[in-house]
Image (tube, rainbow, N blue to C red):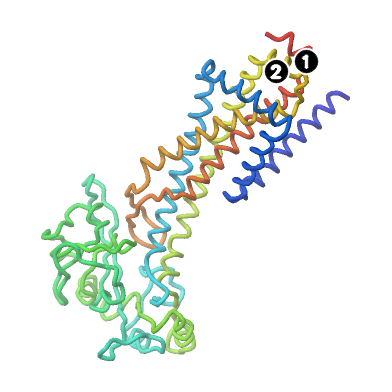
Amino acid sequence: MRTFKSFLRGLGLVAIVIAGLLIWSRLPWTAVLALVAVLALWLVLTRRGRQTLSITSVGISTLRQRIGASLVVVVGIAGVVGVLVAMLAMGEGFQSTLQQTGSDDTAIVLRGGSNAELNSVLDRDSVNVIIQAPGVARSADGKPVASAEQSVVANLPKRNDASIEANVPIRGVGDEAWILRPNVKIVQGRRFKPGLRELVVGQGAMRQFAGLDVGSRLRLAGQEWSIVGEFASGDSHDSELWGDAQTVASAYRRGSSAQSVTVRLTSPQAFDTFKAALSSDPRLKVDVSTTREYFSKQSESLTKVIRIVGITVGVIMAIGAIFGALNTMFAAIASRAREIATLRAIGFRGLPVVVSVLMETMLLALLGGVLGGLISWLIFNGYTASTLGANFSQVVFQFKVSPELLWLGIKWAMAIGFVGGLFPAVRAARLPVTTALREL
């Protein structure tokens, strides 16, 4: 019978842990602050709360005597938080870079069924129909603000290791591209001239690949090209090389076709009209989306993979950190068994003991979470990396350690502290006084 009751108590604790973690994972920071305020009022205004403060202060005062074991908890949780935040910062930085590309008042048109520019082909007749569709903005001279563009890739050596080559995207554009993307600014040199084998290079591509400095010459598609300028855009176009559309098409034998058409709309509200006109035209079979939507979709699959990997690694490390916290707190309870038994003998109830042990463990967890988040922010925030997407070439981006990620890391740390401290806390509260007084 006693064994069965112990089993039920253990099962109840597991249920409490699962329910607590589910609730905790969904709490916003405002609700957490409210819980902290409620706990503070309970500690100050109630008798059991003051008992909890007394026990907690004694426990914290003994941390110096068990600094080694306490550091195991802090460092273990810091490692979990640091790895988790760094992995998720990579995904968030990549997603942010692509989501910053494009806008709601520009649209991109691809061949029907194409999920990226590299897989799309549009003939000249289709391009002419697209740029004349209703909803397309026109310049002062009455011409559609539209750019029929090429998108190809070339293998270039990496700047930090010339033995490694990676894909760099080359975009063939016309004069309208600069109007469509006003955030693209020349920061060194000049723009390419139409009809010439000249290229301008994005800042991200210049940092990642060798031989792309302004004034350099590059061999692409069996022809010599000159690097005449460097541009900055602050989005995924920073990873590209731009050249004249007709010259790029000729070099790569694309004829008069284009791979995508980007247009400026008269307003964001004109997108539905533009899309409906193209979808209902029997001469066309195309996919239409805003440029913001298109580039956001390009980031979804890789961002999801990074997030899954990051959380999986974090869970594995968190399990190790929980066992470290369990060992540390069980050892701490064992060393303080007489003290806790004496307190219970003179009238301290089990609840203050449980809460005090949890507070001590979660304090160590909080220190570990802050330390892990700080290290991750110092090392990885703004760190430049590059990656290959599923449907496009190499994209240069920066890790983004946002406040939301830091808060997520803190929540993970506190969850680990809760799980690691709950079972030792319950054991301390349930240990018979006579048994505890005989220990040590």
**Amino acid at dot 1:** Val
Circle 2 Cα neighbour tier, 10 Å, few/some/many (<14 / 14–19 / ≥20): many
Query: How many dots with numbers?
Result: 2
Residue bearing the label numbered 2: 340
Judge whether 432 appears above or below 147 on screen.
above
Q: Is residue 158 left or right of residue 378?
A: left
Query: Relative to the observer, which residue lies in front, 427 or 160?
Result: 427
Residue 243 position, x and y percent, is 21, 70
Task: From this view, report whether residue 398 is shown above or below residue 141.
Answer: above
Helix, strand or loop status at disc 1: helix
Occupied quadrant, residue 172: bottom left
Residue 256 percent location from the top left of the image: 27, 81
- With 104 as the anchor, is 49 left or right in this view? right
Q: Would you name the residue on which mark 1 appears?
A: 433
Q: Quadrant of the C terminus?
A: top right
- Residue name at image x 50 percent, y 54 percent: 304
What kind of element bears circle 2? helix
